[in-house]
Image (spheres, rainbow, N blue to C red):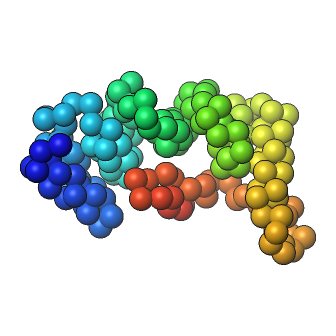
Amino acid sequence: MNDNIQVLCEQAQSLVQEKNFEQATTVCDKILKNDPKSNFALFNKAFSLQQLEKLEDALKSYELLIQFHSESQDPSAAFYNKGLVHRDLADFAQAEYCFRTVISFHPEDPDSWYMRGDAFDSLDEKILAEACYSHANKLNENHSSNEQKTKDESNNIYEKGKKSINTPFGQIKNEP
């Protein structure tokens, strides 16, 4: 990677962290001019567009990212965020597909199971939704079996619409 691209990547990363998403997309476009298959630029552009609620454009960037993803990188974050975009666009069948794909890579991820249940719930598939919610709660209980939990916490691990969004820097809350 040449020095100019490295500087642009650092700038894009900084802009995303500062939540300056409009400028981040501009910098990512500069990176993509030189490297149209840059996983870093495609992810950050898609994420920034998603945060700006330019959902159709974000979807296109996530699709390119998935198409061009490096074999050495896990595409799960792109599929997860793409599922969130489909959910926001009320395309629940595609959202369910995306979360199912994440589960195929990470079957122990309770967030993906919950979001798949959320998609099923929106599709009026109540039995499938409940099975996914139940499995998400079971996985979460297994992950935190060493921690003390109150009965109320274990009965309802998740609140609808408050799942995390994957970012290049970890997860952030997705408040409705």
Q: Is residue 26 visible?
A: no
The mark total stands at 0
Q: Residue at x 48, y 36 (%)?
A: 75
Q: Residue at x 49, y 43 (%)?
A: 77
Q: Position of residue 84 (x, y in %)?
A: 52, 42
Using the image, determine if residue 66 lies above or below residue 174.
Answer: above
Q: Tell me the quadrant of the picture where the C terminus can be found.
A: bottom right
Residue 58 in the figure: left or right of residue 10: right
Q: Position of residue 109 (x, y in %)?
A: 67, 47
Q: Tell me the quadrant of the picture where the N terminus can be found.
A: top left
Q: Position of residue 149 (x, y in %)?
A: 84, 72
Residue 91 in the figure: left or right of residue 141: left
* Viewer-closest of 106 and 157: 106
Q: Residue at x 13, y 35 (%)?
A: 34
Residue 73 in the figure: left or right of residue 52: right
Residue 162 in the figure: left or right of residue 13: right
Using the image, determine if residue 166 lies above or below residue 125.
Answer: below
* Viewer-closest of 88 and 173: 173
Q: Residue at x 49, y 38 (%)?
A: 74
Q: Where on the picture, by quarter, is residue 157?
A: bottom right
Using the image, determine if residue 16 lies above or below residue 72.
Answer: below
